[in-house]
Structures are given as C-alpha cells and as structure tokens.
Amino acid sequence: MLRPVVGFDRWCWPVCDPASGLGTTGIGEHDYWPMLPRLLLLDQRPSESGALPTLNGPRARPAGDRGLRFLDVLGAVGIGDELRVPLRDKHGLWGCLDLMRSSDEQRFTEQDVAFLDGLAPLLASATRRSAAAAAAGRGESAAPQSAGVFVLDSDLAVRASTPGARAWLAQLLPPGLPFGEIAAMAPIYNVASRVLAIASTSRAPSTRGRDLPARARVRAANGAWAMIEADRLDPLERTVAVTIRPAAAQDILDLRLIAHDLTVRQRELVNALLDGSDTKAVSERLFLSPHTVNDHLKAIFDKVGVRTRKELIAALAAQ
C-alpha cells in the first residue's frame, strides 16, 4: 500500500521490545544480510547519523550524510537514500519502518516525510496490536530449561558460547529464511550493541538510549519465550557477555498488558486479579471503590477482547 504513494525498492520493519527499544524480529526485503551485524552495531551509537535511539520522528537521510551506516553498509549495496520512521507510543518504541531507494533514484522529499509522520501513530498502533497477538497463547513445545551465554567482541563476532546458548539459537532460527542464523542472532547483536554503545558514550552527556536496558524479550518459532540480556565482561576490554534464559512469567505478562494498551492502573488491577483477589480485595488494595473497579474491568475486557474475569485470567495467564 505504501509503495505506490511513497516509492521505494527496499524496506525493513524491525519489531522491538518497547521496554528497551531493541529489535527482536522483523520483516523486510533487502540485500545487506551479510552486513547486518555491522548495521545493528552502528544503529545503537547516539553519535551515528540516523541511529534509532536518537530518532524522535520520521527522518530522511540529509544530503551529504557521510555516516558509517551508509559508508559501511547501505551505500555498499547501492542504497542512496533512506527514510526511517520510529513507531513509538506512550509505552515505548514498538518498531521502525525503514524505506530505502537506490542511489540512481530521486531522494525522499519533505512531502514523503510529512506523509509518514502522519501515518506513524497508526503504524505504531498496528505494530503494538501485532505484538499483543504474538504474545498470546502457549508455546508448542518446551523451551531449553537452562540459560546460555554468548561472548562477543567489539565487532559482534562470537568468540565463545555455551551449549545452552546454542540450543536457544536453534529455537530462534526462523524456518526457511535465507541467512536464517544471522536473523536469529539479530536480537543478540542488538543487546550487545547497546552495551558497546553505552561504553563508548560513558563520558558523554546523557542521550536517549544510553539509560535504556540492554535486554529484550524474544519469542522463538515454537512459541517459547526467552529473555536476552547483555553486560560487559570485565576485565576484557570491549567484550560482551550475552545471556539467554527462559523468560519469567511476569516479564511476558508485562509485555502482554502494555501490548493491549492497558493503563498503569489497569495493569495494577489485572495483577491483583491474577493474585486471586476479588472485587472487595482489589478495592482495598488499590484504594478504589467497587464501582470504579468494575468500570476499569469493563475497559480491560474491551481492550483484551474478553467478556468475563475467567476469560481475562485465562487469556493473560497462558504461558
């Protein structure tokens, strides 16, 4: 639908964990798969032109931009211009729409940027609703029970890994996708890149992205949920340890609640219900009248698409 209006020949739509703004999966049509680790590494640097953590709204590549994202990756495959659209709402960054044109095509215009700026809230809402659907239901099979660790260097090359990490990577492999292992490693590259970016800006003034966590919740192809986290590996300089473990139930519940656009108060109420509280107990716990509790419940039912408390609990507690 967008191509006839805006015009582009390559595109990518990464989906992010809204708590960290780090990519977990995505779709697209592009030809820079072998260079994806380098692109993801640069995309977390606040100093890099067009880096995702610094974007407040749609942005086309400025004329004369000599950033490393273009010099090292995009320009190397013949891309001449890029229009990036961060998909944010009150809950965080849900994804980013990247549209690209070849170097022999016209550049994106201010009208293109304005059009995508108006469309961005709708695209963010659609991505959030997609996350709600993806977070629902049970996995088809059990996840690896143990945690695993990858050790990556400053170029995101894997220097060591545990059997548990390799077992998780096998779960994350998208079936039938060319460059599937690179795609499966993408969230691992992302969390490691966040740590490396923080280390490189530790003496710089505070910037967006610097205070965000280096962690992401990722759902495997079989439905199992993993929590991927990264930290520096001291005393080795610019070396990162990335841990993959089964995600805790509360981690996934939190994602489900914001994916359904529940307010802070509504999320508190749902957590009270899942603890087994009835209306009277919820009222006392949250200092609300029973009437207000019931009003909140009606709004929650509508957002989640259920009709009763039993259906709500079944929908949100499913793991």
Image (spheres, helix red, strand yellow):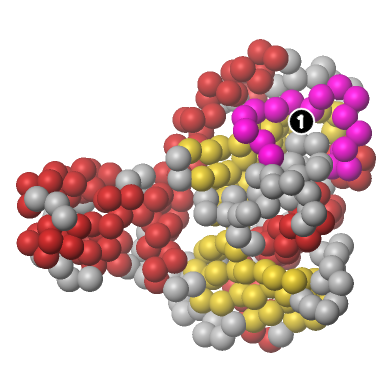
Is 74 situated above or below 283? above
Please say if 151 is above or below 294. below
* Rendered position, 147 above or below 19: below
Magenta span: 52-70
Q: Is residue 2 visible?
A: yes
Q: Residue shown at 55%/69% (left/top)?
A: 227
Q: Position of residue 208 (x, y in %)?
A: 65, 44
Assign a secondary structure to mark 1: strand
Q: Quadrant of the C terminus?
A: bottom left
Quarter of the figure that contains the N terminus: top right
Give the image quarter of residue 249.
bottom left
Q: Relative to the observer, which residue lies in front, 144 or 21?
A: 21
Q: Give the labeled residue for mark 1.
A: 82
Q: Is residue 288 left or right of residue 98?
A: left
Could you tell me which residue is drawn at 7 percent across and 52 percent down?
290
Residue 150 sits above or below residue 278 on the image: below
Residue 188, given in percent of the width and then of the height, sits at 69, 65
Q: Quadrant of residue 216?
A: bottom right
Total numbered badges shown on the rendered structure: 1
Task: Please state the horizontal and vertical placement of residue 73, each as a whole percent of the image.
Answer: 87, 44
Q: Position of residue 101 (x, y in %)?
A: 79, 28
Instruction: Identify the residue at image location x=59%, y=50%.
Output: 21
- Tag 1: residue type? Glu
